[in-house]
Amino acid sequence: MNLLALTFPDIGHLLEWPNILPGLDDTVFALNKVGIIYLFAFVAPVVMFVMAKRRYAQAEVITAPRGIQTVAETSVQFIRENIIMQTIGPDGLRYLPFLLAMFFFILFSNITEVVPLIHFPGNARMAMPLTLAVLVWLIYNTIGIKNHGFFGYLKNITIPPGVPKALLIIVLPIEFISTIVVRPFSLAVRLFANMLAGHLLLVTFAVLSHTVFWLALFDDTPTWLVIITPAPFLMLIGLTAFEILVSVLQAFIFTILTAVYIGGALHPEH
Amino acid sequence: MNSLSSSLLAATEGESTSNPIIPEWFEVIWGSIAFFLLLIVMWKLALPPIRRAMEARTDRIQGDLDAAASAKAEAEELRASYDSRIAEANAEAARIIEEARAAAEAVRQERLAAIEPEIAERRAQAEADIAAARERAMAEVRSDITSIAVGAAEQVVRASIDEAAHAQLIEDYIERVGN
Amino acid sequence: MIELLAQADNAVDGLKAVGAGLGYGLAAIGPGVGIGLVVGNAITAMARQPEAAGMARTTMFLGIAFTEALALIGFVVFILLNFA
C-alpha cells in the first residue's frame, strides 16, 4: 500500500511479536510482548490490591479509604453493586472474585494500548478473549446444569416462556445456537475486534502523522499538505482519549455480560 | 538487551504468517497462567481483607447512624415533654388571668349593687325638694299677685266697692287666668 | 500462462479487498442505526425517570454491546478477507 509515499505496515508487522526467551522459539512456552502484557495484567492489579491491603494492616481504626485503597474499594463496590446486584442478585456475590479478576485482567491488558512505549493491547490477539470466553461458557453451562439438571437446563435455554407451540420449531434451534455457539463467539470477537480496530486506528493515524510531518520538511511539498500537517496528530490525540474509554468500556461489558450469562443460568425466566 | 528491547518495540518483519483470528498457543498459555494467578490472588489474598474492612466500615457507619437516630429520638422525646410543660404553664397562666378577671367583675357588680339604693334615695329626695320649692314659689307668687291686684284696684275704684266684693271679684279673675 | 495466473491472482486480491471494504461498510449500517435507537431511547428513559438512570445506563451498555457485535463481525470478515 503506497499513497502519497505513505507506507502502511503489513498486519503481521503490527500483531505478531518475536519470542524473547532463548531456546523456546516456536514452542508453547515462547514468551513474546503479548505474553508480557498478560503478565503485566496479572502484576498490576496484584500490586494495587497489595498496596490497598497494607493500609488495612496499618490503620488501626477503619477510616475512610485513601489513595490506592479508594481505587480498590471503588472497583469492588462497583463490581458488586453495578454488575452483580443488577444482573444476578445477592446469590451472585460468590462470583465476585472471578468477575473482579476478569475485569482487572481485561482492563489492564486493554489499557496498554495507550500506555507510551507499549502501545499494544493484549486483547488485540485472539488468545485471551477466546480463552476467557470459553471459560465463561464452561462456567455458565456448569452452573446451569448443576442448578437445573441437564435436561432442565436444556429446556431453560431452548424454550423461552410465552412462545406459542407452533413457533417452537423455529425458536428452539435459534435459542440453542445463540446460547451455546453465538454467545462465546460474540463475547470473544467483541473484545478482540474492538481492541484490534482501536489499535489499527491508532496505527493509521500515527503512520499518517509521521508521514505528513516528514513530508512537510521538503520544499516541493504542496502548501495545503503543510497546512494540514497537525490534523492527523490532533486526531491521534482524540482517538487516544477515545481508546481509553473503549478499554474501560470493553472490560466492563465483558464482565457484565459474563454476569448476565451466569444470572441467566442461575435464574431462568419462567 | 538490545535484541530484547528491539523484539519488544518492533514486531516481526514481513508478511503475516498466520490468520489474525486464530489464537497462538503460546499466547494462550501465558495469558491463562497470568489470569489464573490473578484469580487465585484475588480470591484468596486480596479480596477477603478488603471485604472485611468494607463490611466493618459499613457496620460502624450503620452503628453511628443507629446511635444518631436513637439520640435524635431521645431529643424529640425531651422536646415533646418540654412542649407539654410549656403548654401546661400557658394554660395555668390563662386560668389565673381568667379567675382574676372574674373576681374583679364580681367586685364591680357588688359595689354597683351596694350603691344603687343610695342613688335612688338621693334622686327621690332631690325630686321632692324640687316639688316643694315649686309649690312654695307658686303660693308666694299667688299671694303676691293677689295683694298687688287688690292694691291696684283699690287705687283705681277706691271706696266704691267693699273689701269682700273686691276679694270675690279678684278671686274669680285669678281663677279664670289660672285656668 | 504464468502471467495470466499472476493476473488472476491479483484480480482475486483486488476482489477480496473490494469485498472486504463493501462487507464492512454494509455491516456497519444496521448496527449504526441500532446503536442510535438504543442510546436515544435510553436517554429518553433517563430523562423521564432520572432515579432509574443507573439501571437504564447498564441496560443501554448491554444493548450497545449486543448491537455492536454485528459490526464487529463485519470488521472480522474484513480482517479475514484482507489479511488472512
Image (spheres, rainbow, N blue to C red):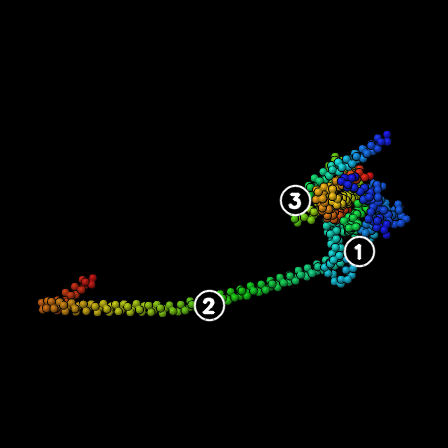
Where disc 3 sits, the SS reads helix
Closer mark to the observer between disc 3 and disc 2:
3
Q: Are marks 3 and 2 in contact (CB under 8 Å)?
A: no
Where disc 1 sits, the SS reads helix
Q: Residue C66 is drawn in which quadrant?
A: top right
Residue beneath the point at 65% across and 44% down: C44
Camera-side residue: C20 or A123? C20
Q: Mark 3 lies on which chain?
A: C
| Residue A153 visible at all | no
Q: What amino acid is labelled 1 in the image?
A: Val
Asked if residue A26 lies left or right of residue B177, the reply is right
Residue beneath the point at 73% across and 54% down: A74
Q: Mark 1 points at which residue?
A: A47
**The C terminus of chain B - image quarter:** bottom left
User: x, y percentage for residue B93?
Assistant: 52, 66
Label 2 packing within 10 angstroms: few (<14), some (14-19), many (20+): few
Q: What amino acid is labelled 2 in the image?
A: Ala
Closer mark to the observer between disc 3 and disc 1:
1
Residue beneath the point at 71% across and 42% down: A223
How many circles with numbers are drawn on the protein?
3
